[in-house]
Image (tube, helix red, strand yellow):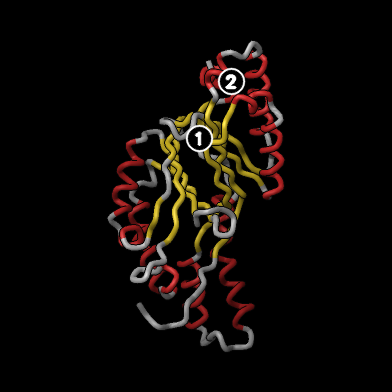
């Protein structure tokens, strides 16, 4: 590990994201006399949630005992996420659910390569960080490289049939500390990490969200694919990459199947 000054990585942020998981109280739900009306109310709510111009919403059924339902929301602010969450809690269906898991984050794209490219271009022009106009010119060059990222920052939820979501953090141990690495060292690790992911780009869409200061883990990773076997293949290969093998800590994994609003009846039948 180098003794050079630590470079805090720059990022670009998009939609705020809430992964909201619930467990159905099945004995109470089966005894509910107004089940059909409650389901119709929930279906109408999800229809409205998906019609927003500033984000998106989707419903997934989670496989396994960690949760039964996961609502995934993209919104323009934490306040907007709070409103959609509160509107769901007002539904009668919420009375028959128990909290399962939640994760608050924001779509994030690291600018490791973009910042390095901008710095190289300024260096080629004879400019360095001590130059009077360096910061202004640097931000102008950086903006050119980040303009094309908007479609990834403010996107719709990928429409694939399966999701794999998990939170993660970077290790801060005595011998392996991600945050003590220099910018160039972290950049090299992430370049290698990205190479692994690019092999699967035709099979899976990865949405990385930042959660430092927002939730208990530092990032969330949502993988969207039509074949869930891709999740196993991709995550396995990633585990052997040094960025994960040396520096990554992983939380619980949630794998689910996407459902349209009108299919909520099938989930609760």
Give residue 259's position: percent from left, percent from top. Answer: 52, 27
Q: Residues within 10 Å of mark 2 (few under 14, many from 20)?
A: some
- Distance, label 1 to label 2, CA atoms, is 16 Å
Residue drawn at 65 percent across, 45 percent down: 75
Residue drawn at 41 percent across, 37 percent down: 225
Residue drawn at 67 percent across, 49 percent down: 78
Where on the picture, by quarter, is residue 244?
bottom left
* Above or below, comparing residue 151 to residue 42 in the picture: below
In the depicted view, which residue is nearer to us: 139 or 10? Answer: 10
Give residue 90's position: percent from left, percent from top. Answer: 71, 30
- Side (left or right) of 150 relative to 232: right
Q: Please name the residue that numbered disc 2 is placed on.
A: 262
Residue 115, which numbered label?
none
Give residue 150's position: percent from left, percent from top. Answer: 59, 54
Q: Residues within 10 Å of mark 1 (few under 14, many from 20)?
A: few
Q: Quadrant of the N terminus?
A: bottom left
- Side (left or right) of 94 relative to 164: right
- Side (left or right) of 211 relative to 41: left
Q: How many marks?
A: 2
* Above or below, comparing residue 133 to residue 139 in the picture: below
- Residue 258 in sight in this render: no
In the depicted view, which residue is nearer to us: 131 or 52? Answer: 52
Q: Please name the residue that numbered disc 1 is placed on.
A: 159
In the depicted view, which residue is nearer to us: 26 or 60? Answer: 26
* Above or below, comparing residue 203 to residue 8 in the picture: above
Q: Nearer the viewer, mark 1 or mark 2?
A: 2
Disc with the residue nearer the chain's start (1 vs 2): 1
- Side (left or right) of 46 relative to 129: right
* Above or below, comparing residue 226 to residue 183 in the picture: above
């Amino acid at each position: 590990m180098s003794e050079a000054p630590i470079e805090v990585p720059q990022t670009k942020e998009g939609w705020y994201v809430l992964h909201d998981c619930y467990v159905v109280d099945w004995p109470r739900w089966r005894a509910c006399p107004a089940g059909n009306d409650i389901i119709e109310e929930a279906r109408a709510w999800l229809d409205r949630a998906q019609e927003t111009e500033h984000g998106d919403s989707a419903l997934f059924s989670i496989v396994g005992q960690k949760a039964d339902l996961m609502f995934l929301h993209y919104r323009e602010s934490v306040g907007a996420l709070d409103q959609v969450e509160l509107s769901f809690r007002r539904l009668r269906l919420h009375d028959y659910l128990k909290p399962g898991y939640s994760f608050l984050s924001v779509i994030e794209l690291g600018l490791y390569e973009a910042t390095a490219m901008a710095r190289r271009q300024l260096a080629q022009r004879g400019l360095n960080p001590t130059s009077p106009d360096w910061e202004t010119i640097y931000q102008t060059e950086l903006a050119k490289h980040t303009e094309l990222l908007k479609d990834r920052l403010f996107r719709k939820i990928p429409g694939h049939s399966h999701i794999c979501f998990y939170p993660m953090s970077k290790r801060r141990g005595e011998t392996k500390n991600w945050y003590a690495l220099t910018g160039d060292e972290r950049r090299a690790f992430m370049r290698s990490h990205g190479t692994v992911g690019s092999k699967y780009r035709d099979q899976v869409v990865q949405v990385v969200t930042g959660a430092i200061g927002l939730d208990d883990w530092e990032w969330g990773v949502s993988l969207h694919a039509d074949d869930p076997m891709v999740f196993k293949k991709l995550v396995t290969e990633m585990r052997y990459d040094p960025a994960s093998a040396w520096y990554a800590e992983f939380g619980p994994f949630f794998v689910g199947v996407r459902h349209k609003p009108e299919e909520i009846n099938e989930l609760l039948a």
